[in-house]
Amino acid sequence: MKSDNYDLLIITPNHFKNILKKFKQHKEIFNIQTKIVTLTEIYNSIFITSNARDKQEKIKYFIKNSIEKWNIKYVLLIGGNRQLSVRYIHNFDCYPLNLDVKEPPYISDLYYADIYDNDGNFSRWNSDNSNKYGEWYGKTAKDKNIDLRPDVSIGRLPCKNRLELKILLNKIINYEKKSYGKEWFKNIISVGGNTHPKCSSEMGGELDLEKALAYMKDFNKIKLYTSKGNLDRTNIIKSINKGCGFLVLSGHGNLAYWTTYKSNNKEFIPKFSTYHLNLLLNRYELPICIASGCRNSAFDTSPVNFIKHPYLSYYWMDCIPDCWMGKIAKRITGGSIASLGSTGLGYTKYEPITGGKADAWSYLIPRFFYEFNIKKTNMLGDIWSNVIKNYLKEFSIDWNTPSLDYKPNSSEPKPDVINARTVQQFILLGDPTLKIGGYDLDIL
């Protein structure tokens, strides 16, 4: 590897490389020095040699060498799970409606960003040297003392084909060139209700959103809350189609839809599904979408999964063409410019299982907006990275505590495993070098 300096490393399958050339030129106009490397080059060790155990570890070793030789700060992964390998984490929870059903292993792109352990050595996430990573089951974690702090800011464009990649890249280029100073960017849509009425009478989702909005004093706040009686699919779609800089949803969901509970009762509002995303027509007035919920960003979906495990697909919802957060990002007539969500089952501080020591999404959502509008961090990947680092400062992890699927009927709080899961599952489906609000072309 040469000693040239780069800011952004793009890792891509071979068949996407030519499509990325225009994107590289765009980034370098704005002084983001960009290096494109194919998976074939990494797997065949053209640039490096390593004793990596599998494809995922080869990619991670390459990122490590890119940091040390090229001073890389950002990494963009191109492709879904079938195009660019994901690292699955074996740290399970059980589905509330059926404790005999466990969630599948969840994706963690943080694995590719957490390069060094606490001693500065390569962070393998596999201290027991098994063929499973991030294991936490029974009375204690099997893969202990994972650092979890990102050493680079990482994002992924979960495209399955060339057309989807072209859509995503075109949206980013247009956003960064044409969004600066636009009135629509100053709109922030907040959507929520009572996330856990069985646990608390507090309007938890709305409280978390209000904390986030307190950091956005100079923005026009569009509040769609169950307590206001104005939260329904129609209002969400209409509000998005008018253009906004941010769309934040605090509630429940899965791969196929987002929802929440009505005020202080156990009835869900009508689901906002992937089907309804087809009604988004906001063109290039694109928000960054942040949504709490369960597995809304688990992009390893395929109708083939229903053939593999039809019973489990009823719970996992992994047999649809696209996950909710992936589809809103790839929507050609609008949608979002990027999405941040969870690849596994998610949590908030209002659940007894957290024991008051794991705020999870009740922290992630407000902290995102604190980083953006108080600390004035305007690169999307830097916000993702800073949110995780600050979460780990606030909330500790004792790796010698029980897993969530250990005695699932127990009322014993398990904050430590929730804290680990919270950051491992927090994923950016988008460009980590995205300039939030776009560039001022007059000063180029």
Image: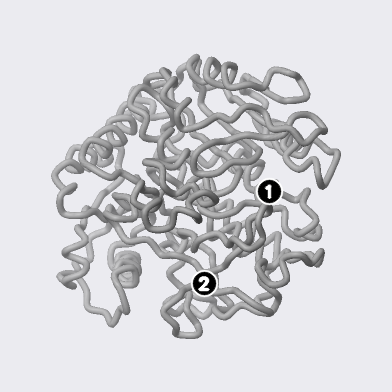
Coordinates of residue 214 in the picture (x, y in percent): 71, 32
Residue sitting at x 35%, y 54%: 75
What whole-number distance in Å separates the C-alpha atoms at marks 2 and 1? Answer: 23 Å
In what quadrant of the picture does the N terminus appear?
bottom left
In what quadrant of the picture does the C terminus appear?
top left
Name the residue at the bottom extreme.
Answer: 128
For label 2, the residue is 134
Horizontal relation, residue 119 to residue 81: left or right: right
Which residue type carries mark 1?
A: Tyr
Q: Earlier in the sequence, mark 2 or mark 1?
A: 2
In front: 219, or 308? 308
Element assignment for label 1:
helix
Image quarter for residue 396? bottom right
For label 1, the residue is 363
Asked whether residue 70 is in view, the answer is yes
* Count of numbered circles in the view: 2
Q: In this picture, is 389 found above or below 375?
A: below
Residue sitting at x 30%, y 78%: 52
In front: 338, or 31? 338
Q: In this picture, is 444 found above or below 344?
A: above
Which residue type carries mark 2?
A: Gly
In front: 44, or 179? 44
